[in-house]
Amino acid sequence: MIVAMTGATGFLGSNLLFEIFKQNFTQLNRLKIFALGRAKTAEQLGESLEKLMANDGRKYLGLSQEEYEQKLQPIVKQCIIPIPADLTQDNLALSLPELSNLKQAKIDFFFHVAALTDLRCDRSVEFSCSEINVKGTQRVLDLVSILNLREFIYIGTAFSCGMEVGKIQPDSINTNNLFRNPYESSKLKSELLVRDYFRNKAMKFRVFRPSVLAGRLIERPIGTTKKFDVFYSIPAFIVKNKYESVNSLNKLYSEIVEMPLRVHLNYNSGLNIVPVDYAVKIIYGACIHSDPSTFYHIANLQPIPHIEYGKWMLEAIAVKGCIPSPEEPTNKNSLEKLYYRTVGRVLQPYMLSESMDFQTDNLRSLENKLNIECPPINKDNFMKLMDFAKQQYFGLNLT
């Protein structure tokens, strides 16, 4: 099998890479992966991918260091072909030899995973989202047009529906909707490019729309993530400020600290969180099983109320005094001023939204074939996500 993919070193992309290896472990001599990624040279990209496989990839596959070195390391270089590519450049800045290599291959699946995920509303972010997500997708499609390809897979987002509420179908399109940020609108524009390109073509394509991606809850190490954004950013904000108070890593989670923070949120709404390993199993599984659907939501059956996961995260980081608020406080204390200027400014549009019911009915038959189901985000599983995040200090540099 021959696969091409963008974004192999990113959060979703790296887990997809691991899953492909896992599903082809007994026939790796037949696996070839063209990994398109941003790097100055193929050597640099190759080193990054080899390091990724030797660390998190090894753990995902359940291999000890010794097993990895004996069974997998010798053939990783044979399986993965690093190709430096830049979504912001014409022809993705591919060299002629690399382009020729791609054109000569009979590619089974091309996964376009790479994207800029930035939920801020700054003009610079709007420009970058346009260059990377929209124009970058068009450049990928231009490349696809000259390749020998069986199937194209685009990774979008469930939030490309914008401010839509209620039941939302996986192929729903509404260009007149309001969007919370440039990221959402750029992903819709990108998906429309994909739809338009394949409208009159015989080639199969699929569009996957994940909801909020979290760490792993199926494959070990449980909780693993390298992106501490969206809901992770709230405890990260609190932990950073707590550390300034206790000034000790040893006391960071053991000492209960009172931190007065009123968080404006919708009491009747929540966040749909899905583990990244479940997401990649669905994405890859749909392809290798030739699932008949074209559009998919990758989402949990139920969103978790903001109030619920808010309680759990405060318990996990041993903080009291943070409370939900039906309104944004007008008489803000210093901590609240900082919160609403930073994290709150980015997340508030999501925390104030009405309920969004992402329809996932077409996943049931695929789940049966794969013998999996989406892990629910209950307290036990949420605490597992928090445990890993705590070990990594939520991505903060506190030393």
Image (spheres, grey):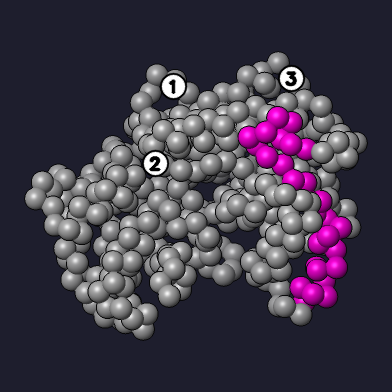
Residue at point 85%, 63% (across, down): 75
The answer to whether any part of residue 171 appears in the image is no
Counting other residues with Cα less than 10 Å from the Cα at mark 1, is it few (<14), some (14-19), or many (20 or more)?
few
Residue at point 41%, 33% (across, down): 123
Q: Quadrant of residue 338?
A: bottom left
**Disc nearer the start of the sequence (1/3):** 1
Q: Residue 42 in the image: state x and y as whole percent.
A: 79, 51
Task: Give 241 or 258, whichever is nearer the viewer.
Answer: 241
- Amino acid type of the residue tagged 1 in the rendering: Asn
* Residue at the far top in the pictured view: 200
Q: Residue 28 in the image: state x and y as whole percent.
A: 84, 58
Secondary structure state at the residue bearing disc 3: loop
Kindly report the distance in space between the C-alpha atoms of the residues bearing marks 2 and 1. Answer: 22 Å
Task: Give 332 or 192, whichever is nearer the viewer.
Answer: 332
Q: Quadrant of residue 51?
A: bottom right
Q: Residue 303 in the image: state x and y as whole percent.
A: 37, 48
